[in-house]
Structures are given as structure tokens and as C-alpha cells.
């Protein structure tokens, strides 16, 4: 967290804790009645939904706590204008002849993480689609597909297939969420930019060597020069995450 504040001293920062997440979603439950997961579901589902809902209502930059900032991202954000900006991570691409159960198919759908997301203003229609698709997947047992990166990947593909705001509004749930949040869906849909992997996600858990580096970060008492030297940083890299994965713990919400 301190690295983001140090590189963006003029920005407003908020540490989002459980109290804020559940309180905010309770305040906006009329617009997002399905955002809070049931008692038998992992809390990460609610946390994921909060990200999308909050970006729809307020805009701004969302960043996970296990993201280490190396350089300012101001230039990236200022170039987005009306576009949502997302990162990408290297994942193996499926081939045309791959069977339905080929791991490369679901790995590639994790290539648009939800750990760093920027929306320059409230009301970007991508979030309407993400939230609507998540409502359809409430019973999906797979967290990544229900509310995580696979959801974001699938929503982005559907968004890019929509030729107009009218097309987007025909997708089940989108119009209801837009009306509940007083969001107008423009006929000309604003763009979504996806950054190259080296900008934000130089470490990928799809690589055996990178998994070893990630494991060292996860177990280290502090981030030192020895660890930092193992991150494949280029002049384009602005930040990196070491994928701490605390959400996988099945502990109840505090």
C-alpha cells in the first residue's frame, strides 16, 4: 500500500476493509441485490462483486493489496479518457483442436485479472455487463468463473461483441442494473483498453519458474532486494503482484 501512496502522493487513497465493503453493499443493496454471497459461499465472491459495483457507481482505480508499485501510473490513467483500463497476464492460449476439457481453455480465460482495474468516471457500461453476468453465475461452484478473472474475461468478450448500447441492453440484467443505478447506456459504447502483461503482471502463475518466485514472495517476512531482483521488470513495468492468494483460505468473514 505504501508503494502506491509514495508514487502517487497527490491522489486520494482509501484502504478498503471488510466493514466498508459489506456496509457499502448493504447501502446499495437495492441496486445490487445479488452482490453479497450466501453464508455457504467464500467471502471473496462478495469482495469481487464489490469491486465491480463500486467502480460502476464511483469510478476510480482499484488495486489489490499484494500489488507492489514501481513507477507512477498517471500517464496510463490520463490516456484512458472514457475507457476502462485493465491489465493482462500471460496465459497459454488454447488451440483450435483442443478438447473442451483442455486446461489451456480455462487458463487463458484467467488472462484478464481483476486485481487492478481503472474506470475514469462512474457509469461505464462494461461494469453493467460484468455484474449482470455474475448474477447469472451465482450458483457456479468455481470462484474464478463466478466472480473472478474468468467472469471479467467473458464479460469483456461479450462487451466487444456488442455493436451498440442497444445490443448491450438486450443482455439479461443489464438494463435493470442501469436503471437502478441511473446509468445511461450510450449507443456508441466507450472502449476498454487492455495493457500488455509486462506493464502490470510480469509474474504469471502459469509459469513454473514464476510460481517459484511467487512462492518466495508469499513466505517472505519482508520484500528485499534479493526478491525484487527475481521479478522480470522492464522499462514498461509499472507494478507487479505476487498473487498472495489469501482469498483461498476458507476462514469465515471477521
Image (cartoon, helix red, strand yellow):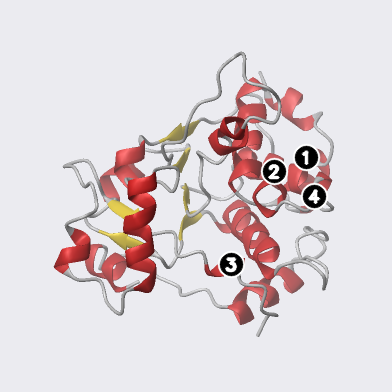
Q: Which of marks 4 and 3 is nearer the N terminus?
A: 4
Residue depicted at x 51% and y 47%? 113
Instruction: Look at the numbered disc 3 and give the secondary structure of its residue.
Output: helix
Q: Can residue 113 be seen in this view?
A: yes
Q: Which of marks 1 and 2 is nearer the N terminus?
A: 2
Instruction: Note whether 107 is above or below 123 in the view shown.
Output: above
Q: Are marks 1 and 4 in contact (CB under 8 Å)?
A: no
Which residue is the site of mark 3? 247
The disc placed on residue 140 is 4
The disc placed on residue 128 is 2
The disc placed on residue 174 is 1
Residue placed most toward the observer, 96 or 17: 96
Residue placed most toward the observer, 200 or 81: 200
Q: How far apart are marks 1 and 4 (CA)?
A: 19 Å
Residue placed most toward the observer, 98 or 25: 98
Q: How would you rate the neighbour count of disc 4 (Cα within 10 Å): few for under 14, some for 14-19, many for 20 or more? A: few
Q: Earlier in the sequence, mark 1 or mark 4?
A: 4
Instruction: Note whether 242 is above or below 84 in the view shown.
Output: below
Q: Distance between the residues labelled 4 and 3?
A: 17 Å
Q: Nearer the viewer, mark 1 or mark 4?
A: 4
Q: How would you rate the neighbour count of disc 3 (Cα within 10 Å): few for under 14, some for 14-19, many for 20 or more? A: few
Q: Which of marks 2 and 3 is in front?
A: 3
Instruction: Look at the numbered disc 1 and give the secondary structure of its residue.
Output: helix
Q: Distance between the residues labelled 1 and 3?
A: 28 Å
Q: Distance between the residues labelled 1 and 2?
A: 5 Å
Amino acid at each position: 500500500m505504501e508503494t502506491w501512496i509514495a508514487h502517487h502522493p497527490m491522489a486520494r487513497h482509501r484502504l478498503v476493509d471488510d466493514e466498508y465493503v459489506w456496509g457499502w453493499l448493504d447501502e446499495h443493496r437495492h441496486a445490487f441485490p445479488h452482490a453479497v454471497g450466501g453464508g455457504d459461499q467464500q467471502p471473496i465472491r462478495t469482495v469481487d462483486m464489490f469491486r465491480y459495483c463500486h467502480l460502476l457507481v464511483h469510478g476510480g482505480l482499484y488495486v489489490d493489496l499484494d500489488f507492489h508499485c514501481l513507477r507512477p501510473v498517471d500517464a496510463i490513467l490520463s490516456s484512458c479518457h472514457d475507457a476502462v483500463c485493465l491489465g493482462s497476464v500471460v496465459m497459454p492460449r488454447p488451440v483450435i483442436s483442443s478438447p473442451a476439457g483442455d486446461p489451456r481453455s480455462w487458463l487463458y480465460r484467467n488472462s484478464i485479472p481483476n486485481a487492478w482495474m481503472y474506470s475514469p468516471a462512474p457509469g461505464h457500461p462494461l461494469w453493467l455487463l460484468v455484474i449482470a453476468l455474475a448474477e447469472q453465475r451465482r450458483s457456479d461452484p468455481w470462484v474464478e468463473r463466478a466472480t473472478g478473472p474468468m467472469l471479467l474475461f467473458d464479460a469483456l468478450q461479450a462487451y466487444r461483441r456488442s455493436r451498440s448500447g442497444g445490443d448491450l441492453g438486450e443482455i439479461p440484467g443489464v438494463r435493470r442494473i442501469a436503471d437502478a443505478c441511473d446509468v445511461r447506456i450510450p449507443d456508441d459504447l466507450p472502449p476498454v483498453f487492455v495493457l500488455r502483461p509486462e506493464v502490470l503482471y510480469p509474474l504469471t502463475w502459469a509459469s513454473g519458474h514464476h510460481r517459484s518466485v511467487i512462492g518466495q514472495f508469499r513466505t517472505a517476512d519482508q520484500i528485499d532486494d534479493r526478491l525484487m531482483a527475481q521479478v522480470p521488470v522492464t522499462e514498461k513495468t509499472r507494478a507487479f503482484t505476487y498473487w498472495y492468494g489469501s482469498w483461498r483460505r476458507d476462514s469465515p468473514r471477521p
